[in-house]
């Protein structure tokens, strides 16, 4: 049996995981940048650190900050499922071709979904969200088929 480091499907999975982690890190940092740009801090100490001696926190989140927060929350809800299912997929020895399709498809869908969410582009935001879900479902089905056949 190949070690995971030599398995081409695991290498693809690892690369997709890294790309998705970069996405999550970007969204986290972009949230802070948007809060700073719009002086829409979530904590009084952050407002004070930016020069507001009273540490005023707005009662409502700025719409642009809210958009980034929603994009980040959506990614945080979906990406961990890929981390889990992708690893199970590789360890179960499911179809390499199916893995390639689902891993790259999910990763591309999530990257595009974040872009479309930040830029307020419909219907493509919903389409890429749905595609990501279909790729996760495909992984579940192929894992089930592999485990049932062994």
Image (cartoon, rainbow, N blue to C red):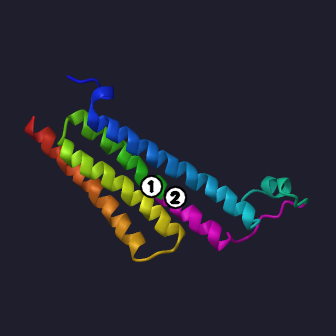
Q: Is residue 95 above or below residue 64?
A: above
User: Which image quadrant: the N terminus?
Assistant: top left
Q: Residues within 10 Å of mark 2 (few under 14, many from 20)?
A: some
Q: Is residue 129 above or below residue 102?
A: below
Picture quadrant where residue 133 is located: bottom left
- Outermost residue toward the bottom in this view: 122
Q: Which residues are magenta?
A: 54-74
Residue at disc 1, secondary structure:
helix
Q: Picture coordinates of residue 72 (x, y %)?
A: 53, 58
The residue singled out by tag 2 in the image is 73
Residue drawn at (20%, 48%), measured in percent from left and top? 98
- Seen from the viewer's position, the closer of residues 28 and 43 is 28
User: Which image quadrant: the C terminus?
Assistant: top left
Residue drawn at (15%, 39%), measured in percent from left and top? 147
Residue drawn at (18%, 47%), measured in percent from left and top? 142
The residue singled out by tag 1 in the image is 77
């Amino acid at each position: 049996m190949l070690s995971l480091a030599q398995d081409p499907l695991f290498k693809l999975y690892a690369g997709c995981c890294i790309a998705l982690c970069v996405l999550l890190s970007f969204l986290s940092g972009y949230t802070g940048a948007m809060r700073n740009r719009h002086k829409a801090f979530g904590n009084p100490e952050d407002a004070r650190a930016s020069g507001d001696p009273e540490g005023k926190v707005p009662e409502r989140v700025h719409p642009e900050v809210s958009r980034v927060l929603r994009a980040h929350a959506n990614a945080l809800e979906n990406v961990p499922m890929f981390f889990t299912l992708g690893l199970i997929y590789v360890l179960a020895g499911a179809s390499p071709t199916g893995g390639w399709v689902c891993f790259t498809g999910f990763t591309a869908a999530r990257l595009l979904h974040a872009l479309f969410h930040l830029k307020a582009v419909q219907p493509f935001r919903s389409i890429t969200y749905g595609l990501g879900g279909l790729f996760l479902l495909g992984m579940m089905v192929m894992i089930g088929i592999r485990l049932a056949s062994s």
